Image (cartoon, rainbow, N blue to C red):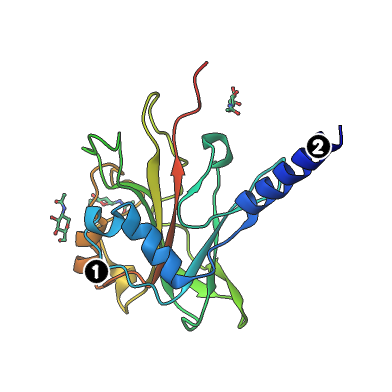
């Protein structure tokens, strides 16, 4: 009886840690990206200088703050996420991009990069340790929740933060009607002067378990 109560308490503490532990170390985020080959697979150089904090709103539970490599059940990923910066990146503007390099499956990513979000004109709303980002214009490409097909292994849904260069708002490569599959974020970043990301994180999500 006593043992069971302690076990339950430990499980509770463990689940709290899993759902609320945000990224706290640039080195750990970089290592997590490298461990699963994200920089290589999406053709970026990843040397983050700030932490990108991504929060998934949950209607019936505590909101989920991502940390690099967190496993989030599909049903908890409806979003749309909110974003914040830990670290000093100035007040903006910033661009946030979310891609799936594993679409439709990690073994055959023929639709990578699948664009799950692209938004510009994000500004840090106040100075402090955690600076929430406010988007002052509608998303270029609205957030789409993950839809990994049945039977697929976990996908690496990757969130990246960029400094927004002058003139970015005049880009015509992507708008709300541009097909989301088979995008190339890296070549888009090159063409629009985004350069390399200054922060990022990722979550692992697969299809709902079948019974
Ligand atoms: C996810 O949500 C769907 C639709 O509401 C539900 O049928 C399913 O049981 C849920 N799956 C899990 C694993 O919670
Ligand atoms: C989106 O871009 C396409 C291709 O460049 C263009 O034909 C279309 O008019 C644009 N749509 C909007 C809403 O700007
Ligand atoms: C995407 O763009 C990068 C940078 O331009 C390029 O190196 C890479 O080959 C492209 N990826 C694909 C799959 O075409």
Judged from the image, the secondary structure of the residue bearing numbered disc 1 is helix
Nearest the viewer among 137 and 99 is: 99
Judge whether 211 appears above or below 98 on screen.
above
The quadrant of the rendered image in which ligand 3 is seen is: bottom left
- Which is in the foreground here, disc 2 or disc 1? 2
Residue 192 is labelled as: 1
In which quadrant is the N terminus drawn?
top right
Judged from the image, the secondary structure of the residue bearing numbered disc 2 is helix
Q: Is residue 144 visible?
A: no
- The residue located at (28%, 43%) in the rendering is 179
Q: Residues within 10 Å of mark 1 (few under 14, many from 20)?
A: some
Q: Can residue 206 be seen in this view?
A: yes
Give residue 104's quadrant in the image: top left
Question: Looking at the image, which residue sits at the far top?
Answer: 211
- The residue located at (32%, 77%) in the rendering is 165
- The residue located at (66%, 51%) in the rendering is 63
User: Alpha carbon of mark 2 to alpha carbon of mark 1: how far?
Assistant: 59 Å
Q: Where is residue 88 in the image (x, y as percent from the top left)?
A: 50, 82
Q: Position of residue 143 (x, y in %)?
A: 46, 48
Q: Where is residue 38 in the image (x, y as percent from the top left)?
A: 30, 55
* Residue where numbered disc 2 is placed: 3
Q: Earlier in the sequence, mark 2 or mark 1?
A: 2
Q: Is residue 32 left or right of residue 124?
A: left
Q: Where is residue 40 in the image (x, y as percent from the top left)?
A: 22, 57
Give residue 160's quadrant in the image: bottom left
Q: In this view, does 110 lie to the left or right of 203?
A: left
Nearest the viewer among 65 and 12 is: 12
Please say if the residues under marks 2 and 1 sit with CB atoms less than 8 Å apart: no
Residue 22 is labelled as: none
Q: Is residue 149 left or right of residue 15?
A: left
């Amino acid at each position: 009886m006593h043992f069971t109560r302690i076990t339950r308490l430990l499980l509770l503490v463990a689940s709290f840690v899993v759902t609320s532990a945000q990224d706290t170390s640039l080195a750990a985020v970089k290592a997590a990206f490298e461990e699963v080959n994200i920089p290589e697979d999406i053709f970026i150089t990843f040397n983050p200088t700030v932490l990108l904090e991504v929060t998934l709103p949950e209607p019936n539970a505590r909101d989920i703050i991502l940390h690099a490599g967190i496993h989030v059940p599909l049903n908890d990923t409806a979003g749309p996420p909110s974003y914040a910066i830990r670290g000093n990146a100035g007040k903006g503007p910033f661009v946030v991009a979310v891609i799936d390099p594993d679409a439709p499956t990690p073994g055959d990513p023929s639709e990578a990069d699948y664009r799950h979000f692209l938004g510009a004109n994000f500004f840090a709303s106040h100075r402090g340790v955690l600076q929430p980002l406010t988007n002052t214009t509608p998303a270029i490409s609205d957030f789409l929740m993950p839809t990994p097909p049945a039977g697929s292994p976990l996908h690496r849904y990757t969130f990246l933060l960029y400094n927004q260069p002058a003139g970015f708002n005049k880009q015509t490569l992507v708008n709300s009607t541009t097909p989301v599959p088979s995008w190339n974020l890296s070549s888009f970043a090159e063409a629009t002067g985004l350069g390399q990301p200054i922060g990022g994180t990722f979550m692992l999500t697969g299809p709902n378990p079948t019974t």
